[in-house]
Image (cartoon, grey):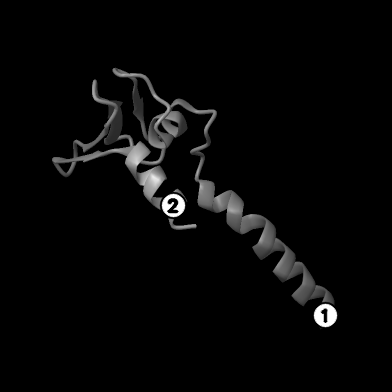
Amino acid sequence: MKATIAIAAVLITVIGTPALARNGVTSTTLLGRIVAGHGMPGDTARSKSDPDVTFRVLDNGKVERTNSRLGTVFITNPRAEWSRTSLSR
């Protein structure tokens, strides 16, 4: 009985963790495309989990992340992030 519960717990952890890690941002959503660097200049998307956070693709291809509640703005270059992480593999 304990072995069955242990196996079930491990399976739930293994199966559930990737689903939770994605948090609804897949490459098929507009937000996912923007974050992955596939958005077109002018594309905007609002986070479902935090509606105060918006993402916008700038003319130079960089992504502007704005949090209206905190008054913060971050600009990232998703293509540079991708090339940096892909070269380190």
Dot in front, 2 or 1:
2
The image shows residue 64 at horizontal and vertical percentages of 24, 33
Q: Are marks 2 and 1 in contact (CB under 8 Å)?
A: no
Which residue of the protein is positioned furthest toward the bottom in this rendering? 2
Determine which quarter of the picture holds residue 74.
Answer: top left
Q: Please tell me how crowded label 2 is: few (under 14), some (14-19), or many (20+) other residues with Cα within 10 Å.
A: few
Tell me what residue is drawn at x 70 percent, y 62 percent: 12
> How many numbered callouts?
2
Query: Which residue is label 1 attached to?
Result: 3
Which residue of the protein is positioned furthest toward the left in this rendering? 71
Number of the label disc, if any, that sits on residue 87: 2
- Please tell me whether mark 1 sits on a helix, a strand or a loop: helix
Determine which quarter of the picture holds residue 65.
Answer: top left
Nearer-N-terminus badge (2/1):
1
Number of the label disc, if any, that sits on residue 83: none
Q: Amino acid at mark 2?
A: Leu
Residue 16 horizontal side relative to residue 54, left or right? right
The image shows residue 48 at horizontal and vertical percentages of 41, 35
The image shows residue 37 at horizontal and vertical percentages of 39, 32
Where 61 falls versus 78 (above or below)? above
Q: From mark 2 to mark 1, how far is it between C-alphas?
A: 42 Å
Tell me what residue is drawn at x 71 percent, y 69 percent: 10
Where 69 falls versus 13 (above or below)? above
Tell me what residue is drawn at x 39 percent, y 36 percent: 35
Where 14 falls versus 24 (above or below)? below
Identify the image quadrant of the N terminus. bottom right
Tell me what residue is drawn at x 39 percent, y 24 percent: 39
